[in-house]
Image (tube, rainbow, N blue to C red):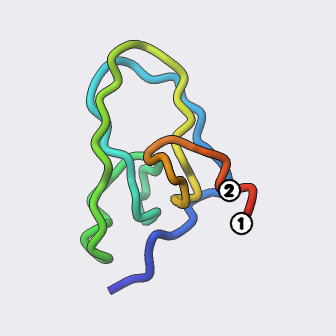
Amino acid sequence: MMDCPKVAQPGPYVIEVTPRRYAWCACGLSDRDPYCDGSHRDCGMKPIIVTIEEPQKVAWCGCKQTQTPPFCDGSHKSL
């Protein structure tokens, strides 16, 4: 089993999103980060599913240390 969560990037992914369901990668192993690609199977974690209701800019957590998953809460500043 791999160590996770892995810090995918030391800051948020700020992305304009459209209304739909998203699977946020919680393990940090995805090649499509911040979105899940199924790589969590190697460490046993699961993605966080979130539904976005309207077009907006989202700050997805990149460090995977957030206390408010899947959104950035500034935890990367203490890494």
Q: Residue furthest right?
A: 77
Q: Position of residue 43 (x, y in %)?
A: 32, 76
Q: Residues within 10 Å of mark 1 (few under 14, many from 20)?
A: few
Which is more toward the observer, 33 or 62?
62
Q: Position of residue 70 (x, y in %)?
A: 44, 45
Left of 50 or right of it: where is 77?
A: right
Q: Position of residue 40 (x, y in %)?
A: 31, 66
Residue labelled with disc 1: 79
Left of 34 or right of it: where is 42?
A: left
Q: Position of residue 62 (x, y in %)?
A: 56, 52
Q: Is residue 1 above or below residue 68?
A: below
Quarter of the image for residue 66 reads bottom right
Q: Amino acid at mark 1?
A: Leu
Left of 54 or right of it: where is 11?
A: right
Disc 2/disc 1 C-alpha distance (Å): 5 Å
Residue labelled with disc 2: 76
Quarter of the image for residue 18 reads top left
2 and 1 marks in contact (CB < 8 Å): yes
Determine the residue positioned at 40% across, 58% down.
26
Q: Which quarter of the rendering shows the C terminus?
A: bottom right
Q: Which quarter of the rendering shows the N terminus?
A: bottom left
Determine the residue positioned at 74% across, 55% down.
77
Rendered image: mark on residue 17: none
Determine the residue positioned at 65% across, 55% down.
75
